[in-house]
Image: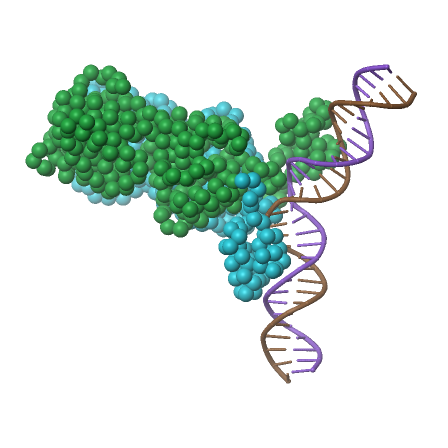
Chain colours: A green, B cyan, C brown, D purple
Amino acid sequence: MSKSFVSANDVARHAGVSRSAVSRAFTPGASVSEDTRKRVMNSAQILGYHVNQLARGLMRSESGIVCLVVSEMDTPYRAQLVRAFSHELQKAGKISMLINTDRSDSGVDAALRQTLNYRADASILLSGLPDKAITKLCLDSGQRIVLINRDDNINGPFHINLNDHQAAKVAVNAFLRAGCRALAFVNSEVGTPSLMARENGFLAAAASFGLNVTVTRHGNTVYESGRHAAHSLLTSFDRPDAVFCVNDLMALGFIDSARQDFGVRIPEDLCVIGFDDIEQASWSSYELTTFAQPIDQIVQASLLWLSEAADTQNVKSQTFNAPLVWRKTVRGNHQQVS
Amino acid sequence: MSKSFVSANDVARHAGVSRSAVSRAFTPGASVSEDTRKRVMNSAQILGYHVNQLARGLMRSESGIVCLVVSEMDTPYRAQLVRAFSHELQKAGKISMLINTDRSDSGVDAALRQTLNYRADASILLSGLPDKAITKLCLDSGQRIVLINRDDNINGPFHINLNDHQAAKVAVNAFLRAGCRALAFVNSEVGTPSLMARENGFLAAAASFGLNVTVTRHGNTVYESGRHAAHSLLTSFDRPDAVFCVNDLMALGFIDSARQDFGVRIPEDLCVIGFDDIEQASWSSYELTTFAQPIDQIVQASLLWLSEAADTQNVKSQTFNAPLVWRKTVRGNHQQVS
DNA sequence: GAAACTTTTGCACACGCTTGCAAAATGCGT
DNA sequence: ACGCATTTTGCAAGCGTGTGCAAAAGTTTC
């Protein structure tokens, strides 16, 4: 029941070799004869030995632990990202620790400090929350850091960003092709850099065509906020005929409210574009035209950067495009607008 | 850049005490004078010291690590569960490791073995996948195990189950009150014990009223499968007027297809009940009447059991009811059917 | 067969921490 | 001031592993 763990010593005794030999047998590239390695492995198999990663992490510089720092991880997009990351990390032989930053109180910092205590090799921040100071602390402790969609102007981490400006421009183009003129932008009050970039990009692109944009901001980036947005946009005298929602969840809430509370037909009366391409966007009740998060690219790029030697990390940041996936909430020919 | 970690030794030197004193200062309940503890904490603060959990886990029986073993974690219900668990574990001072069992290949077993290598205190299995043998292995290594909605007849783990039978009975009653007579059950081909329990419970309850049930099984427990189910159930000559879907995702797919492909009105022509109460079920396009997963209870019970001393764990399993939350996909008065 | 060389092996120390044990320090009652 | 009980403290022995170093074993060359 208790300390039933078998140590390298036990294996060494069973195999009739020294403990160092066991250690080396489990260390790729170490100097061991094929003969003894085989004998060690055999004994290990029989005794059920697994190298204690805690102890190994104590000696080695790498612990094999990567932290995923994320809030609201039951949100569709976040959940997808976490799944993808954990999957790929696992495939790469790393193990992922989950740091939940839902509560904005000091528990977050405490949790992030935990990642230091476990000597994590790296942290991947999917959430906007953790304090910049803590980020710095992790960096100073020799942790590699990947920042996703954050604009901390801090040196050392790998920055991954979306080309929100470009996407916003594509959205404006799509609306114009559909013959829309009264543009609106649905944002939340969160004010995350990437959300604001979408807003500003949209405004700028519209302005370049001499068009005004009605902007609303409501609550969080959730379904219910989308409904609120619909209520404030569609009760006004001059309704928009095109709405770019900062996020799919808000878009879906907006659509539901627009149809049910205001009898608006989509896309006949009103075109809608979202962002994220969550699974629900493809459901037949919505068929939302939206920008797809390049999740695979984000994950791949992160892992690649993490796998590079610390002194070889030449590239400091990377920007990806979110392609527009055409469905049925925008009128017109479903053709890639580049 | 490298080994910039400050050790207990450094703190000891700085505070003018012995290394043991430092260790004890960070160990709740250890014998240290308030004076030295304060001095140690002060020095630790200045030097930026954090106890190395790897080293601590090496000595102590507990590592503070809990593994969450889960597949398809971007599924709404699973994502909610993972979020709740990680949140509460963190609040309890534990740290959670994520084991992704999406791939059914040997990578899973490897990952689960990893949890052993990191000397995790416990594993919480939210997924049906991991092999029984591996579960046994973890148990033998002294790990506590929580099984959620699995029926492995194995001794040692804490079993948490839903009262699927009871829920199915409630569903039948609700349908009968709504005046439905042609009952159908939409299942997936996965055949998880809890899914089968819902099916069997539904059939049994219906039989007790002398009613037959049409059963379909399609693919995975996902939206698309629900659509398939609608196609096979609604093209037949005698359509059902009540459908219990094993899962909300399938229910939503079913509803969309029923409405759009077959012009069925819900609940006028057809009543639908789901299971899980995912967020989307409450969206105004659906307003699905469904059974709510008692997530909080599941999490609380798990943590309580984990916090108990190993020899005090008197209770071996626990069953929770999933309450029916009434929305608008079943006709009749919205009253709790007990 | 001996010398020069390469590979393999074992010793011993390090990693950063906990903890039993005995010594030192403190408190208390007389 | 003294003896005794009670904390507090430091020493040292671990926990399970990696790794430099030198000795041992094996291989090649002349």
Task: Specify the quadrant of the image occupied by residue B222.
Answer: top left
Q: Is residue A101 left or right of B40 when viewed as pictured?
A: left
The foreground one among A118 and B211 is A118
Task: Look at 56% across and 48% down and name the residue there.
Answer: B6
Task: Look at 30% across and 32% down and name the residue there.
Answer: B248
Q: Point out residue A120 in the picture as x, y percentages from the top left corner.
A: 51, 39
The foreground one among B60 and A153 is A153
Q: Point out residue A28 in the picture as x, y percentages from the top left corner.
A: 63, 28
Q: Is residue C1 left or right of B115 when viewed as pictured?
A: right
Task: Look at 43% across and 26% down and name the residue there.
Answer: A300
Task: Specify the quadrant of the image occupied by residue A128.
Answer: top left
Q: Point out residue A272 in the picture as x, y percentages from the top left corner.
A: 20, 27
User: On screen, A216 above or below A329?
Assistant: below
The foreground one among A61 and B191 is A61
Q: Point out residue A337 in the picture as x, y percentages from the top left corner.
A: 25, 19
Task: Specify the quadrant of the image occupied by residue B3.
Answer: top right
Farthest left residue in view: A237
Q: Is residue A282 left or right of A16 when viewed as pictured?
A: left
Task: Look at 74% across and 32% down and name the residue there.
Answer: A17
